[in-house]
């Protein structure tokens, strides 16, 4: 029998900024808050294309310390669509972000941080981004991610 880990199902963020974090994933990234099991602790599930891909747990009612970033996880990535639209959305909301082109030009990326310091990587297949302006690949991109 073959074994496979499969694909990433979701990631979980433990936060003292639940409302702000929900707003970020809704208003900035365009995810939707959706159904969540009736857990004994507060939180929210954020959906993309019908799947709950971001699970949020509100730790403000606990003594758990708020981590200032993603810990040892450097970033979380999404396969995305609408490169120019997302850049415009982020700019319009005054969000700091970085866009770049992976060497070879087949993949474009946007990096933005959520209110908890989690780095979100949005990946766009260049061939599917018709009419979009490619970000400039620079020497400064070497080793960044």
Image: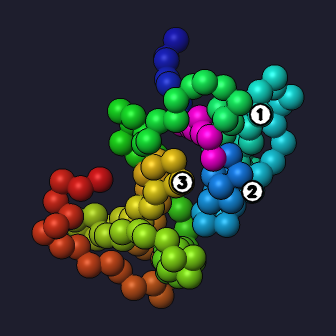
Q: Which residue is mark 1?
A: 42
User: Could you tell me which secondary element the residue under label 2 belongs to?
Assistant: strand
Check residue 15 for magenta coloring. Answer: yes
Q: Is disc 2 in contact with disc 1, using a CB cutoff of under 8 Å?
A: no
Residue 31's x, y, as percent? Answer: 68, 58
Which is nearer the eye, 109 or 91?
A: 91
Find residue 126 and report its image quarter.
bottom left
Magenta stretch in the rendered image? 8-17
The reply to whether the C-beta atoms of the residues labelled 2 and 3 are less than 8 Å apart is no
Distance, label 2 to label 3, CA atoms, is 17 Å
Q: Residue at x 47, y 36 (%)?
A: 67
Q: Residues within 10 Å of mark 1 (few under 14, many from 20)?
A: few
Image vertical order of residue 8 relative to residue 116, above or below: above
Q: Could one spot residue 45 in this view of the protein?
A: yes
Q: Is residue 122 magenta?
A: no
> Where does label 2 land, which residue?
32
Q: Earlier in the sequence, mark 2 or mark 1?
A: 2
Q: Quadrant of residue 26?
A: bottom right
Q: Residue 40: x, y in percent?
A: 81, 23
Q: Position of residue 52 (x, y in %)?
A: 70, 43
Task: Give me the disc on residue 115.
Answer: 3
């Amino acid at each position: 029998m073959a074994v496979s880990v499969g694909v990433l199902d979701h990631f979980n963020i433990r936060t003292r900024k639940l409302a702000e974090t929900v707003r970020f994933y809704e208003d900035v990234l365009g995810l939707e808050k959706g159904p969540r099991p009736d857990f004994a602790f507060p939180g929210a599930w954020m959906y993309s294309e019908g799947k709950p891909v971001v699970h949020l747990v509100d730790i403000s009612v606990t003594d758990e310390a708020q981590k200032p970033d993603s810990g040892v996880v450097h970033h979380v990535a999404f396969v995305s669509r609408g490169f120019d639209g997302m850049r415009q959305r982020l700019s319009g909301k005054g969000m700091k972000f970085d866009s770049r082109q992976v060497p070879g030009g087949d993949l474009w990326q946007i990096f933005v941080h959520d209110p908890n310091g989690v780095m979100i990587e949005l990946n766009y297949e260049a061939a599917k981004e018709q009419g979009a302006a490619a970000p400039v690949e620079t020497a400064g991109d070497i080793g960044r991610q």
